Amino acid sequence: MSRVDWRGQTALVTGASAGIGAEFARELAARGSDLVLVARRADRLAGLAAELTAAHGIVATVLPLDLAGPAAGRALAAEVDRRGLAVTAVVNCAGFGTSGPFHREDPDRLAEMIAVDVTALVDISRAFVDRLRASGGVLVNVASMSAYVPSPDMAVYAAAKAFVLSFTEALWQESLGTGLRVLALPPGATDTEFFDVVGNDAADGGRGRQAPGEVVAAALRALDRRTPPPSVAVGRANRVAATAVRLLSRRRAVLAMASITGRAAAEPGPGDRAQS
């Protein structure tokens, strides 16, 4: 494969109102791609669209949408078709996490997280995959380093991202020989609004956070390879961690993650007896 020529492309980016999604939008616009910007916050999207149109002369279409709703991908595809837009790339950045012991989590919030992080991502991928194959396009699904190991206090989020990683790597194999480039992108802790939504700054394990630009640059470098990989961990430390965790037993891996996040032991439940 040759390098991706983004000129003349139309990239649909979810979660484009902030963080990694907004950074993808800026970088792709700088490379000449038109954009379809998707997120809930219409004002943020409008501001970004105006910025990128003025800076790069591209066409940026704003589609405000809550991806927690049903059939989000099919709704997006229908609106894209109604507007006569030929989407050739999809970058699924939308997602959020929560932090806390599972038994204390709000069930409605968990359902919303699964709807956005898993259900919408699958529905969007399915709604656009045929046209991406036909155009020799690009599909990027943002996962997380949490995908590599269960994460106590972020149990559902980590499981959702493990799904995204597994799902996208499988699509990578299914797409070999079609011209479609598929990439799972599992960044480590990144300097975005993610931790504000989680409500726990310590959820990064006390490690330094990457800049969104660093994450996007790594993804675009991977897509430009002659044989793009199914996934790319961003940064040497994260690549080492992704490899090292495979050498641990499942027990040791989850206990190690608990020590990183500061959850050394479970809180006693109603039937547990405190010991001195």
Image (cartoon, rainbow, N blue to C red):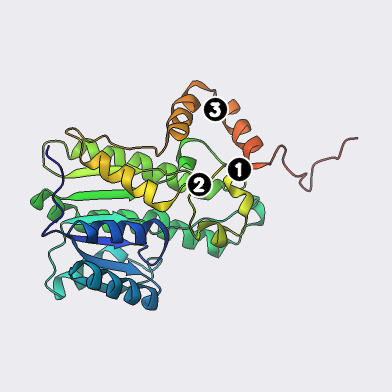
Helix, strand or loop at mark 2: loop
| Res 79 → quadrant | bottom left
Q: Which callout, 1 or 2, points at the residue further toward the start of the chain?
A: 2
Distance Cα–Cα, label 3 vs label 2: 22 Å
> Measuring 47% from the left and 47% from the top, which residue is drawn there?
210
Helix, strand or loop at mark 3: helix
Distance Cα–Cα, label 1 vs label 2: 9 Å
Position in image of residue 136 (x %, y %): 11, 48
Residue mark closest to the camera, 3 vs 2 = 2
> Measuring 60% from the left and 43% from the top, which residue is drawn there?
205
> Measuring 35% from the left and 62% from the top, which residue is drawn there?
22
> Quick check: 40 above or below 167?
below
Residue mark closest to the camera, 3 vs 1 = 1
Position in image of residue 183 (x %, y %): 28, 43
> Label 2: which residue?
189
Residue 255 is left or right of residue 13, and the answer is: right
Distance Cα–Cα, label 3 vs label 1: 20 Å
Check contact, mark 3 vs mark 2: CB within 8 A.
no
Residue 125 is left or right of residue 109, and the answer is: left
Amino acid on which the number 3 mark rests in the picture = Arg
Q: Residues within 10 Å of mark 2 (few under 14, many from 20)?
A: many
| Res 41 → quadrant | bottom left
Q: Residues within 10 Å of mark 3 (few under 14, many from 20)?
A: few
Residue 172 is left or right of residue 195, and the answer is: left
